[in-house]
Image (cartoon, grey):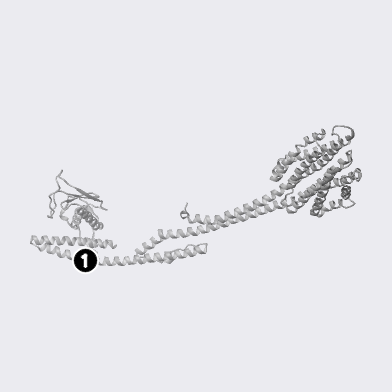
Amino acid sequence: MSSRRWSIRSKVIAVLLLPLLSLSALWAYAADLSLGNALTLAHENTIGNRLARPLGQVIITLRTERRASLEVLAAGSGAAAGGAAVGGSAALRTGRAATDTAIEAFQAQAADGGVRSAEDTEVRQGIDATQQVLAGLARLRQGVDGGLLSSSQVMTDYLTMDQAIGEAFQAMTILPNESAQNFGQNLATLVAGSDLRSEEDDLVSAAAVSPAHRLGPDGYSTFVQAVGASHYLYALATAGLPQAQSAPFQALAAPSGPLGQVMAMEQQVIDAGPNAKSLPFPIAQWRQAYDAQDNTGDQLSIEDISAVFSRTGPPAQHALIALILAGLLGLIALLASIAFSVRIARSLSGDLTRLRESARNLTDDRLRDVVGRLRRGETVDVRGDMARPVFVHREMAQLGDAFHALQLTAVDLAGEDIRLHQGISDIFLNLARRSQVLIHRQLGLLDGMERRAEDPAALEELFRLDQLATRMRRYAEGLIIVSGAAPGRVWRHSVPVVDVVRGAIAETEDFVRVILPPAPPVGIVGHAVADVIHLLAELIENAQTFSPPTARCGSTSAPGRAAWSSRSTTGASASTRRNWPRPTPGSPTSSTSATWTAPGSASPRSGGSPSGTTSR
């Protein structure tokens, strides 16, 4: 729809509505961002407390199960067999039971609806991949129990599970809080280093229970690679951890600490080379140092997982508080803007309404009243009578002042125009009065000449002059009436209708064509006689003008009504002044009619005979 058809009120509302909509959109966008940030932090806190800790526990138990499985395979016995691997079988059963407990706890949390709704795409993909690889754990255990898998295959399958779990944990540590994310990423790196050290333990433990009591070239190469990678990741992770969390791990890596002792024995294995006949240390020494650092490190890692995600709790609360405050402040600002806009719109609309009403009052009431009073000759105080509306806005007040000045100018011009027309009317009235006086004198002279004339031809000419003078009197009186004054002739008493009709016929040009039938015995009130004569004369002359020259004009009169008709008949003459007889019924005629109802009538018995006239 074209904006040209809009009202000013609609345009004002549109102008005020656009910034309100923009402000509403910005407020909604800011609230959405704050809400999204708060929900993300709250979701991360949920994921950390309900997924990361159970998943970390799965990693720890899988390490124990993996070591026990490799020990059983290295000893040459399945988990269900007896003999030399009975102890290893007991350790394997204990490790499997611990793993199953940890996996059940993890699966229960992963299936929870609240946890699933808190997961983003990367975390959900990592959890699904972890559940998929853990589903193959039963098949792997069957291969170990039946002796169907080699040690390298078992190691590869368990490392595949560790890798999937590590990727899931890595996805969980992508946090919106920068410090928490750095903390989590370094903790994930530390867990990866611990996995490599666990791989070293698997190799050493398997070598200790094997018949050769040595690593062998392949085992040695894998051990050396794991040592180098674990040392690098451990140093990188501890350097990036916060001081409170890094200090315990650095204490473990001290020369006198359990991890320091493990590192010393790692160096002994490396120094012994791939062809060493046996391990360079007793397995009990390794087990004591490794288990000490492993248990301590696992406990610290689990506590650090809680510490990582606890850092998202306060920011989440702060974000929710900020969201509430921003929402309330934004809502207050929006409501204030709406109220202010509505007030502005109403004030502008009120000014426009007052301006419109002022214009309407000028055109409908004030200007007509002022013009009417000026026409009646009253004195008008234009500036005192024109009320000025009060506007709210300065620009609208200026527009109102300009319009008020326009009103004053219009009224002044109307007054000047009325005075000009009144002056012209007075001139015409003066000329008409003079003509009327001269015509009256002329009619008096003609009346005297007609009375004294004896020659029929001269009398005929005098009658024609008399009729022309009568018509001139009618025109002069018509000019007086148009000028706003009353004609000079006034009857004091009522006049019979027949005399009124006869006087009207006498004031027409072709009066000889008019038939005057008998009229009812009623009269026209004196003050209306002149107007009725003028009106009837116009109607009769109109009938004469719009009928053929040979047509006769007849009149019919009834109480309260006068009707005029024109009938045409062939072969008629209009050269005599006598009233013609009516046409016989059935003769060919053509007629036009004009009807007028008299404004008042009276019986001749109440003074209906003419009693004279007075002239003004």
Question: Is 36 situated above or below 388?
Answer: above
**Numbered circles on residues, count:** 1
For this view, does 30 lie left or right of residue 132? left
Residue ranking furthest to the left: 455
Residue ranking furthest to the front: 275
Question: Is 317 situated above or below 406?
Answer: above
Residue 47 at least partly seen: yes
Instruction: Write the residue at 63% across / 54% down.
Output: 330
Query: Is 309 in front, or is 243?
Result: 243
Residue carrying label 1: 437
Q: How far across and how far down the image is residue 568, in percent?
A: 17, 49
Question: Is 594 situated above or below 492?
Answer: above
For this view, does 604 lie left or right of residue 255? left
Picture quadrant of residue 66: top right
Query: Is 604 in front, or is 40?
Result: 40
Q: Residues within 10 Å of mark 1 (few under 14, many from 20)?
A: some
Q: How far across and how far down the image is residue 28, in percent?
A: 62, 52
Query: Is 145 in front, or is 375?
Result: 145
For this view, does 472 lie left or right of residue 404? left
Q: How far across and how far down the image is residue 160, in percent?
A: 77, 41
Name the kind of residue labelled 1 in the image: Val
Residue 50 at least partly seen: no
Q: How far across and how far down the image is residue 332, in percent?
A: 63, 55
Quarter in which the C terminus is drawn: bottom left
Picture quadrant of residue 587: top left
Secondary structure state at the residue bearing disc 1: helix
